[in-house]
Amino acid sequence: MTESDLDDLHKDETPAAPPGAMARRFRGFLPVVVDVETGGFDWNRHALLEMAAVPIEMDEQGLLVPGKTASAHFIPAPGTEIDPKSLEVTGIDLDHPFRLAKPERDALGHVFNQVRAAVRRHGCQRAILVGHNAHFDLNFVNAAVARSGHKRNPFHPFSVFDTVTLAGVAYGQTVLARAMQAAGFEWDAKEAHSAVYDAEQTARLFCRIANAWPSPLPG
């Protein structure tokens, strides 16, 4: 099976890696790609509205592949604000009947439960957030965790893998759409600014770049 074949696989279809291989690959961390959509740029003031998380899986040859996406829509937390201009960019309709948004603590729990399950499955110690401008996503997640009093955040509190840096080194591109195209992927601008779409595309980019480096695992 080639790397290209693996790009679109999910974890249920991915041949299993040797036990502990992922933990050794990233020093006990499980990379989990995260994208958030928000009501603005200030994580201490603006609401968290969407979150998607894609655990990274590994096949028996040590190649990385995006896993199954976990996602949730958030009811804006009491006391947070929403800039209408942000909604124009994301296209989020807070009153859409099929949005099925959850209170902040419950929405975090829904995503975190699936991330923790992936961490346990790979024998890792905790998750490390992968994102495009990753500290933006991590800061919003950390702010929501603190605001809601959630006690089981699986992510490292400050370390990240940032695909802006990786794509800049690998392709000379830092904008996600351009980096995806440079990596040989298609980009649908109409789907962009959805947490699920952006997280899944970023996961493909991360795997493509990471798989280009020789694995440090003994062969």
Image: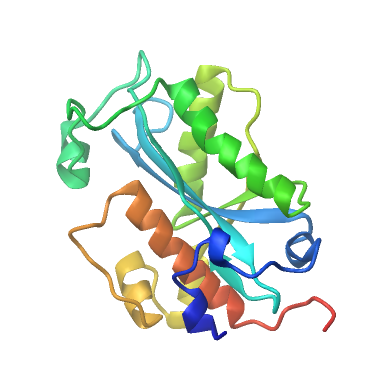
Q: Which residue is farthest top? A: 78
Closest to the observer, 62 or 77 = 62
Q: In which quadrant will I find the N terminus?
A: bottom right
Lateral position of residue 205 relative to residue 129, left or right: left
Question: Residue 20, image x and y in percent?
Answer: 81, 61
Q: Residue at x 37, y 74 (%)?
A: 179
Whether 65 is drawn above or below 35: the answer is below
Which residue is painted at 47% across and 73% down in the image?
Answer: 7
Q: In the image, what residue occupies the spot 80% across and 76% down? A: 217
| Residue 170 in view here | no
Colour theme: rainbow
Q: Residue at left 59%, top 22%? A: 150
- Residue 117 lies in quadrant: top right
Outermost residue to the right: 218
**Along the viewing direction, whichever of 184 and 69 lies nearer the viewer:** 69
Task: Tell me the quarter of the image containing the C terminus.
Answer: bottom right
Q: Position of residue 138 (x, y in %)?
A: 52, 42
Say if residue 104 shows up in the picture.
yes
- Please state if 4 lies on the left or on the right of 49 as rendered: right
Horizontal relation, residue 84 to residue 116: left or right? left
| Lateral position of residue 6 relative to residue 91, left or right | right
Q: In the image, residue 22 lies at what x, y percent?
A: 73, 63
Asked if residue 28 is positioned above or below residue 62 in the image, the reply reads above
